[in-house]
Each structure stands twice: as structure tokens, then as C-alpha cells.
Image (spheres, rainbow, N blue to C red):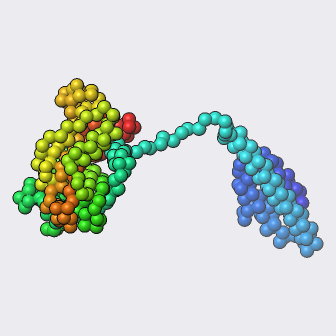
Amino acid sequence: MKEQLEQIKLKAIAEIHDSQSSLEEIRIKYLGKKGQLTAILRGMGSLSAEERPVIGAIANAVREKIEEALAERMAELKKLNLERTLREEKLDVTYDGACSRCGHIHPITRTMQRMTEIFINMGFTVAEGPEVETVENNFDALNAPADHPSRDLQDTFYITENTLLRTQTSPVQIRAMREMKPPIRIISPGRVYRSDVADASHSPMFHQLEGLVIDKGITMGDLKGILSLFAKTMFGPETKTRFRPHNFPFTEPSAEVDVSCFVCGGKGCRLCKGEGWMELLGSGMVHPNVLRAGGIDPEVYTGFAFGMGIERAAMVMSGIDDLRLLYENDARLLRQF
């Protein structure tokens, strides 16, 4: 039995030394419940009382030697694996890394921020209001008659009979007049909603920026000066403005405002459809009925208001001819801006 134990030790140590990965299998083969060393120990019952402690001591020594060999080989393999990993997966810190593609501001947001910045530099403050509005603030206080087309169910998103998704940011002007005292000089950029089918020039949700100025002695000349300065700052110093008579229920007199094409300088091109002018916004002097609805005496104060679509300006400045492209989130398009 001594010879068997010695042979098991030598054979196990040799296998451990030559092993590259299967150390657990070797341990089970020799030291497991059904291992070779265990099998010999089970046969000790046939030995005499004098031989049992001798063989037992030898068996324990063999077990210790095998366990030591296993531990040493395991440490060697870990070291070898670490060296191989460091060698194969080394990182050259001087090599240029792969840069992640950074995002950027959407054309609509960028245009709205630029417009807001221009008006803030002219002394305006930004006013905000809820997107779910009352019919009174959205229509009645703005002098819109009961038969005005914008009140129809097919044109407006009604939530209840008296609440709706605002069709314009003009209700912010009503709220501002009721909360502030003249002089008032505000802009109100934000989302608005109309029941339109999405096409190249319409969307059920879009953005507007409206402005309101109220003080003593405000005239149409002040309105023209503000909008002319805005157009020159926004589209270039050579930009001209053109006022055309129009009709809005909340202003009187009212005017549509065009700007000369900043691409062709008014000569006519694809962007302005050969006209040399591009429609930009609606404007006018605040109607006395609107001033009264806002709690302001029209006999003492006058004012002007204007409103423009932010998408329209973004499309003009970006050369985009289909509104839907701004909402499709196509990275191939957005990366161009």
C-alpha cells in the first residue's frame, strides 16, 4: 500500500505540472469522494492495528503534497493568464481614441433661441402660459367673434366645452395684461395646436413666437421699427420689410409682414419662389376690445402685437421645403444643421 500511495503522489504531481486548465478534474480524480487516494484509504480496514497509523500518516502526507501542487500550479496558471491578457489586450494610450458623435440643437429650437435672444436684447422679457387654455382667453378676450372659423371643431382641439389646446400663444398676452401693469414688453414663444392634417406646410402641433408692447403713445411706427430691426438682426443687415394690409380680430389696423429674400436679395430665387419676398408674420395695433379684456384702458394706453411661426423661419433659414422633415428625426437631415 505504501508503494501505491507513492505512485499516486508521483502520478498526480506529474499531471498537475503538465496541466494547462483542468486542475479541478485532477483534484476530483485523486482527492474526490471516488478518487484514487480515497479508494486506498477505504481499504485500510484490512490492515493491522500497527500498520493503520503508519499508512494513515503517509496518506495524509500524499494528500498535502497533491494539494500544495494544485495550489502552486493554480497560481502559475493565473500568472500566465494575466501575462497573456496584458500582452494581447494592451492599450496604447497615445493612440487616438474613437470619438463619440455628439448631438446638436434641433433647427426649430435653435431658431426659437435666436429669435428670443434678439428680442431680449431689445428689452423684451419672456412670458409663459399653459398650453391647455380656456375658450375665454383663447378666443373671447382676443375679440374673436362667435362665428370665427378657428372656433370650429374641425380646426381646434377641444378638451371640454370651455377648455382647449391653445391655437396660438396670444392667450399669454391676455394673462400678461391682467397680471402686469403698463409699460409691458413681452414675447411668448411656445407650442400651439390646430387640427390640421400634416403635410408640407401644416402640422397639428407647431411653434409660435408672439410679442406684445403696451404703453402710452405707442404707434404703428414703433411696430415697424421693432420688426425691421428684428428682421435685419435675424436675416442680415440688408433685409427689407414690407407691410401689407390684412385683417385680424385682435388688432386694428392689421398687417402681414414680408421680408426680402436674404438669399437672392429680392431678385427672385427658388427659396422665395421667384417673388423676392417671403411672408414672415402677422401684426397690428392691439384692438381696444382686447385691451379692455386685459384690464387696460384703451383711452390711456395703446400697443402693438405680432406673431410668427418659428417653423417657417427655421425652414427658410435651413432651406427645407417640407415641414414634416423637421419632425421625422432623420439623422441624415439633422446632421446638416
- Horizontal side, residue 81 vs residue 116: left or right: right
- Residue 198 visible within the image: no
Of residues 66 and 213, the one drawn nearer to the viewer in this rendering: 213
Q: Residue furthest bottom?
A: 49
The residue at 47%/42% (across/down) is: 102
Q: Residue at x 23, y 43 (%)?
A: 224
In the displayed structure, would residue 161 be above or below residue 74? below
| Residue nearest the observer in this picture, 25 or 139 | 139
Give 151 or 296, whichever is nearer the viewer: 296
Who is closer to the viewer here, 39 or 193? 193
How far from the left and from the top, in percent, is residue 91? 66, 40
Answer yes or no: is residue 268 visible.
yes
- Which quadrant of the rendered structure holds the N terminus? bottom right
User: Residue at position x 8%, y 59% from top?
Assistant: 145
Left/right placement of residue 328 relative to residue 29 reads left
Please identify the residue farthest to the right as the structure is shown: 50
Query: In which quarter of the view is residue 312 placed?
Result: top left
Q: In percent of the image, x 30 and y 41: which residue is there?
A: 229
Q: How many marks?
A: 0
